[in-house]
């Protein structure tokens, strides 16, 4: 089992790197999909697949493709509470 503190909130594999910011944005690098930043509270919910809104659950399958395409443009997307909107 991967240590939860190192688990990718999107694919649940072990992250290549993770940096927590004071302002609660965590910067992560997923071994599959690349770099992104995510609100710390959302990371916890997503890792456990808990308390997600219907819109977030619908968006979950397309999140990897979104992160990957942003990375191809040399951007690391920031994912907040509105990411499923
Ligand atoms: Zn991942």
Image (cartoon, rainbow, N blue to C red):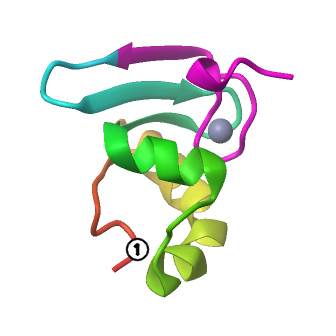
Looking at the image, can residue 32 be seen? yes
Relative to 51, residue 14 above or below: above
**Residue 1 position within the rendered picture, expressed as x and y whole percent measured from the top left:** 86, 23
Q: Is residue 12 magenta?
A: yes
Looking at the image, can residue 76 be seen? no
- Tell me which residue sits at (36%, 36%) in the image: 74
- Tell me which residue sits at (46%, 78%) in the image: 53
Q: Which residues are magenta?
A: 1-19
**Residue beneath label 1, please?**
84
Rendered-image quadrant of the C terminus:
bottom left
Q: In the displayed structure, does residue 72 sit left or right of residue 3?
A: left
Relative to 15, residue 69 above or below: below
Does the magenta stretch mainly form a helix, a strand or a loop?
loop
Element on which disc 1 rests:
loop
- Tell me which residue sits at (49%, 42%) in the image: 44
**Residue 79 position within the rendered picture, expressed as x and y whole percent measured from the top left:** 33, 52
């Amino acid at each position: 089992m991967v240590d939860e503190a190192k688990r990718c909130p999107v694919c649940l594999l072990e992250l290549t790197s993770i940096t927590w910011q004071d302002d609660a944005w965590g910067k992560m690098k997923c071994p599959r999909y690349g770099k992104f930043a995510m609100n710390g509270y959302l990371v916890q919910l997503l890792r456990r697949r808990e308390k997600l809104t219907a819109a977030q659950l619908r968006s979950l399958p397309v999140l990897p493709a979104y992160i990957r395409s942003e990375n191809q443009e040399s951007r690391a997307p920031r994912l907040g509470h509105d990411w499923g909107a």
